[in-house]
Image (spheres, rainbow, N blue to C red):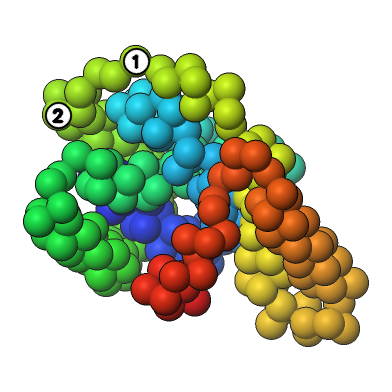
Amino acid sequence: MAAVTSTLNARLTTQGLADIRGALGLGFDDGSWISTIFSAAQMVVTPAAAWMSTVLSTRRVLLWTGALFALASLPPPLVHDYDTLIALQCVRGLTVGAFIPAALGFVLRSLAPQWWIWGIAAYSFRFVFSQNIGSAVEGWYSETGHWEWIFCQNVVLAPVMMLLTAVAMPQRPVDRDLLRRTDWAGIVYAGIGFGLIYAGLDQGNRLDWLNSGVVTGLLLGGRMLVVAFVMHEARAQYPLIHLSVLAQRNIALALS
């Protein structure tokens, strides 16, 4: 449910951009950053979310981020200040960005290895399902004049996910030993680095790629942070990701 909500929101934000721009009186350039910021914020939080699901427990991460996501989804249809809207999109992206890594991590930690393939299959199915149903849902919102539900639907979806989480996921104490060994530098380098690269790629066509200082700066800054992340992981006592694991053939292929 968390993964479906995450993918569906990314899809609706992109496909419903014309409706959002028209309702809020935004130009094409300003409107393009609404979806970019939302998706880039998800990239930024992914490394932290994957780790914190192990440290704090998936249950806590989903309950906290679910509540914040639902609350942050209420104001956007009422906001007419562009900076406030972008800030809300950033908050929404940071919270919903925790959903997918938490969901996949829970599958691998909670199921016996012989059941992993079924858990991953269900996880993969939600991607196809939410990507395709997004077009029909956004079309219905648009045709009925209820564009606000691109945001407001989460006031319904997030509590359902939180209820399922509260009922089905076990309560687990905080792993304070892992918390002390958290690779904060690696989390920051990887998250911000990949977020900047995503934003640069997403805005590339609109701003004419390397002929734009904004795109060049985003890609260059992101690349420098990713390089810093790799160098840091190679020397860190307790790295966020062991590079030797990434070098394994099956992991490297999937990662590529």
Residue 80: percent from left, percent from top = 65, 42
What element does badge 2 sit on? Answer: helix
Give the crowd class for mark 2: few <14, some 14-19, many >=20 residues within 10 Å: few
Residue position marked by numbered label 1 in the rendering: 173
Judged left or right of residue 109, residue 19 is right
User: Foreground: 195 or 111?
Assistant: 111
Number of marks drawn? 2
Tell me if residue 177 comes above or below residue 91 in the rendering: above
**Quarter holding residue 9:** bottom left
Residue at 66%, 51% in the rendered image? 233
Mark nearer the N terminus (1 vs 2) = 2
User: Foreground: 207 or 148?
Assistant: 207
Q: For the residues marked 1 and 2, what is the alpha-carbon distance in whole angstroms?
A: 16 Å
Residue at 54%, 40% in the rendered image? 48
What element does badge 1 sit on? Answer: loop
> Which part of the image, by quadrant, shows the N terminus?
top left
Tell me if residue 136 comes above or below residue 1 in the rendering: below
User: Foreground: 42 or 256?
Assistant: 256
Residue 234: percent from left, percent from top = 68, 55
Q: Please, what is the three-letter code of the amino acid marked with disc 2? A: Ala
Judged left or right of residue 251, residue 191 is right
Residue at 40%, 33% in the rendered image? 54
Q: Can residue 127 be seen in this snapshot?
A: yes
**Quarter holding residue 171:** top left
Q: Which mark lies nearer to you, 1 or 2?
A: 1
Disc marking residue 168 = 2
Q: Can residue 79 be seen in this snapshot?
A: no
Tag 1 and tag 2, C-beta contact below 8 Å? no
